[in-house]
Image: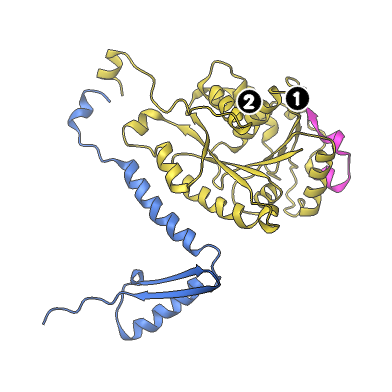
Chain colours: A blue, B yellow
Amino acid sequence: MGLLSLFRSKPNSASIAKERLRIIVAQERGGRGGPDYLPLLRRELLQVIHKYVNVDPEAVQINLEREAGHEVLELSVALPQKPPG
Amino acid sequence: MTEIIVVTSGKGGVGKTTTSASMACGLARRGKRVAVIDFDIGLRNLDLIMGCERRVVYDFVNVINGDCTLKQALIKDKRLETLHVLAASQTRDKDALTEDGVRRVLDELIADAFDYIICDSPAGIEKGAHLAMYFADRAVVVVNPEISSVRDSDRILGLLASKTHRSANGNGGVKEHLLLTRYNPRRVANGEMLSVEDVKEILGLDVIGVVPESPDVLAASNAGVPVILSETSDAAVAYQDAVARLLGEELPLRFLEEPKRGFFARMFGG
């Protein structure tokens, strides 16, 4: 760090990298070991939902949770906010 | 007891072969009988890093196909007498490596009382990488403090947990370690590079070594002398520490902070 760099504002790119990694790794680990049809299921559900509501692709989340003896397929759709009035 | 260690990473160019060569040398220097095998069929490179490229007569695939004996194909290192190299084949046949063939070679090395078999994995997640990790007892996952390398390592960890002999047979799974290479403490201090702690936290694994970025690594590969043998180099010391930890010694990590610099360097240095 030289004298000049004291006057430059420095974005901390390592913390950006860490945050991005944390999210993508968690997401990829979640999908791992799950049935292969999950991504396709997500895509098709999205198409069906799209016929009725205009949702953001990111708003449809599918999670497969394993608990002792059974599995829970959790589907969450965040609907867009209605305009006021 | 033979221990099979895979050196893997997913991403290419992070230092798998450098690490395989140095770990193998380090173990042999401690008197262990070591065989290091290049699984990168079609892109043989371990021989160059080990400095024995002109002594390759037979390779891994020759042994599998029965063209020669394992003994004929193993290249004895000139520096360390307990160290042996098995070169990859240059064939373009992707199916040259088979699970059964690899198993036979490993079984023969085990019967021959080798202490360690180091499997130098190719990049990617194709057949060569799969077979390099399949029979492993332990894995050294080489990772650079860089976003794509960390992500690929996590993918490899997923495969180690599901697609190996140990995971399939419920033998307690493959024991995994992280080894960071190309670590630049100055850039970490400046917030430009992921820190050891960051990588450890994201991947959730213990760190067996941190090798600082060093010009000695290229110099060593130029010369065909594994960098661990470049006595005065930080990279060599870091690899020696990693080998010690692999053998169960507890050592603190070194080279995590930038070396102290003088007044002028601090004021005007880049």
Please give the residue where the numbered disc 1 appears in the rendered image.
B77
Q: Position of residue B236 (x, y in %)?
A: 56, 23
Q: Locate residue B200 relative to residue B31 in the image: left or right.
A: left
Q: Is residue B123 left or right of residue B184?
A: right
Check the picture and name the quadrant holding the N terminus of chain B.
top right
Q: Give the residue drawn at x 47%, y 74%.
A: A72
As drawn, the residue found furthest toward the bottom would be: A52
Q: Where in the figure is residue B140, as x and y percent of width and height?
A: 59, 40
Q: Which chain's residue wears label 1? A: B
What secondary structure is found at the residue carrying circle 1?
loop
Image location (x, y in percent) of residue A49: 36, 82
Q: Which residues are magenta?
A: B61-77
Instruction: Reply above or below: B79 against B243.
Output: above
Residue A19 vs residue A4: left or right?
right
Location of the C terminus of chain B by quadrant is top left
Secondary structure beneath dot 2 equals: loop
What residue is disc 2 on?
B226
Q: Nearer the viewer, residue A75 or B92?
A: A75
Q: Residues within 10 Å of mark 1 (few under 14, many from 20)?
A: some
Q: Nearer the viewer, residue B178 or B91?
A: B178
Q: Is residue B76 magenta?
A: yes
For residue B199, above or below residue B263: below
**Is residue A77 depicted above or below B37 in this figure?**
below
Instruction: Inspect the magenta stretch and tell me whether residue B142 lies in it.
Output: no
Identity, as a three-letter code, of the amino acid under mark 2: Pro
